[in-house]
Amino acid sequence: MIKYLLALLLVFPPYGVANQYPVNDSAVCLAQNIYFEAGNQPVAGKVAVAHVVLNRVAHERFPDSICEVVYQTKEYKTSWRTGLPVPRRGMCQFSWYCDGKSDIPLDSVTYDLSYKLAGKIMAGEWADITEGSMWYHATHVYPYWAGTLNQTVVINEHVFYK
């Protein structure tokens, strides 16, 4: 177990280590987002969440790389423990990145599936079932911005918008 956790730290270093983003490998970044945003959902939910990231990468309003989209945040603060920048809670595009919890995947089976799906989705093996959506939220919440966008589809536990 210790070896597994140490290996994960090499792949997912703590905030601020080496560069602004914890990881700089597109498949790993996309897999992390799939894992944390839709890890508990069927494959369709995972694929949909991944396509939102790809749709954002393709759009001029968002950053040009998968990792930059996944780790996009409005604001950083300085960690009182390390003195390094960390994303301010509630200021990230994807909530898992700035929820204050560990960003190290602990369910290896779910992460492995997320990683494999990320590779296939990036290779174009899965169609965009979100109809070009660039935003989504969980079905149990209704964010302030939801009424300003066009809802496209509901997939598993997420509502998608253009």
Image: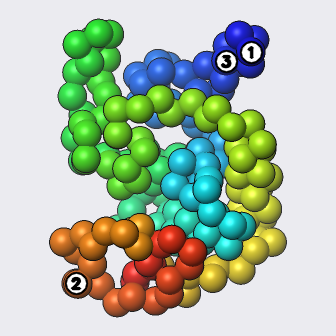
How far separated are the C-alphas under marks 2 and 3?
A: 42 Å
Tags 2 and 3 touching, CB below 8 Å: no
Q: Report helix, strand or loop for mark 3.
A: helix
Residue 148, labelled with which disc? 2
How far separated are the C-alphas under marks 1 and 2?
A: 46 Å
Amino acid identity at mark 1: Met
Q: Please name the residue shown 40% across and 81% down the image.
A: 161
**Residue 109 in the figure: left or right of residue 61:** right
Q: Earlier in the sequence, mark 2 or mark 3?
A: 3
> What sort of colour scheme is used for the picture?
rainbow
Q: Residues within 10 Å of mark 2 (few under 14, many from 20)?
A: few
Q: Residues within 10 Å of mark 3 (few under 14, many from 20)?
A: some
From the top left corner, tell me how far across and down residue 22 is, in percent: 50, 30
On screen, residue 86 above or below 144: above
Q: Please name the residue shown 48% across and 72% down the image.
A: 158
Dot 3 corresponds to which residue? Answer: 5
Tags 1 and 3 touching, CB below 8 Å: yes
From the top left corner, tell me how far across and down residue 107 is, in percent: 68, 37
Amino acid identity at mark 3: Leu
**Frontmost residue, 99 versus 33:** 99
Kindly report which numbered mark, 2 or 3, lies closer to the viewer in this rendering: 3
Dot 1 corresponds to which residue? Answer: 1
**Residue 134 in the figure: left or right of residue 28:** left
Q: Quadrant of the C terminus?
A: bottom left
